[in-house]
Image (cartoon, rainbow, N blue to C red):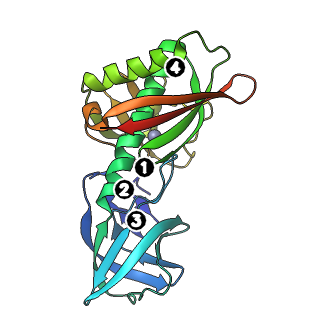
Amino acid sequence: MTFDLHGRTRRLELADQGLRSFEAVVLEATPDGIVLDRSAFYPGGGGQPPDQGVLLWQGVETRIEGVRKGDDLYLVPAADDPIPPAGTVVRAAVADERRSALMRTHSGLHVLCGVVFRDYGALVTGGNMEPMTARMDFNLPEVPPGFKEAVEEACNAEIAADRRIDVRVLPRAEAFAIPDIIRTATNLVPEDIPEVRIIDIVGLDTQADGGTHVASTKQIGRIKVAKIESKGRGFRRLRIAISD
Ligand SMILES: [Zn+2]
C-alpha cells in the first residue's frame, strides 16, 4: 500500500494540490457511487470536507456532490443524473472555488495550530471546516488576558511572513522522528500506514496530514479569530474566519 492509493483509486490530489481536471476510467458505477481508476477529488478527512465537481462523458454531464470512503473511493452523483457505465473514459473537473477556499481555510487552521502550540503549548483535540470558516478545539486550561487578540495578531504575522508550505512523504519511522509531528492530543495515523504525508509550514508547524493546502501562507489571506468558547475543563473552541 502506498500513501496515494485508496482501494483501486490513485489519489492525484495528494501529490498535485493544484490539479482541478483530469481524465479517468470508470471501474464501477451505481447511483450510490462511481469508482474511478484515478481521482483528484479530495475524499474528506482531517476536518476538510469532500470536493464537489462534475464528470463529462459522451456529451453527458454527471454532477458529483461529494465522496464516500469505503473499500474504494465512491464519487457520489447527483440524484437522477446519468451514470457513466464501467469502462467509460470520463473527463473530470473538481469545483475550483470551493476547493481553493478549503485549501486556504485548512492552511489557516495549521497556522492557528502552530501559533497556539508555539505560544501556549496547547494541543489540538478536534476541528472542522467549511469554505472560509473553521473551528479548532484546544486543550488549554487557562485563557490568558488578551488571548484572542494576541492569537489573531500572531497568525496574521505568520501569514505576512509568507512562509512556504511544503508537502513531503516520509517513511513512517523517519516521520515520527520529527519532534511534535503529531499535534493532536491523540495519534490519528493508523498503525499499518508505511508512509506518512507531512505538511510543513516552514519554520512554524510540521504535521502529519492528508489534506490539501496552499503553497505559502500569504495565499491564505487574513485570519480573524471570531470567537472563543469554553466547553468544559480545559476545552476551548476557537472559531476563525478567512478573508482576502
Ligand atoms: Zn490538517
Write the residue at 40% across / 81% down: 27
Report if the CB atoms under discs 1 and 2 are less than 8 Å apart: yes
Position of 216 compared to 109: left or right? left
User: Disc 1 and disc 2: Cα gap in Å?
Assistant: 6 Å
How many numbered circles are shown? 4
Some atom of ligand 1 lies within 8 Å of the CB belonging to the residue at label 2 = no
Counting residues from the N terminus, which is met first, the one under dot 4 or under dot 2? 2
Specify the label residue 120 is tagged with.
none
Is 29 situated above or below 191?
Answer: below
Specify the label residue 148 is tagged with.
4
User: Disc 1 and disc 3: Cα gap in Å?
Assistant: 12 Å
State the residue position of label 2.
Answer: 98
State the residue position of label 1.
Answer: 131
Quadrant (top left, top right, bottom left, bottom right) of the N terminus:
bottom left
State the residue position of label 3.
Answer: 52
Report if the CB atoms under discs 3 and 4 are less than 8 Å apart: no
Quadrant (top left, top right, bottom left, bottom right) of the C terminus:
top left
User: Disc 4 and disc 1: Cα gap in Å?
Assistant: 22 Å
Is 21 situated above or below 155?
Answer: below
Inspect the image, locate mark 2, and give the three-letter code of the amino acid beneath it: Arg
SS assignment at label 4: helix
Q: Nearer the viewer, mark 4 or mark 2?
A: 4
Inspect the image, locate mark 3, and give the three-letter code of the amino acid beneath it: Gln
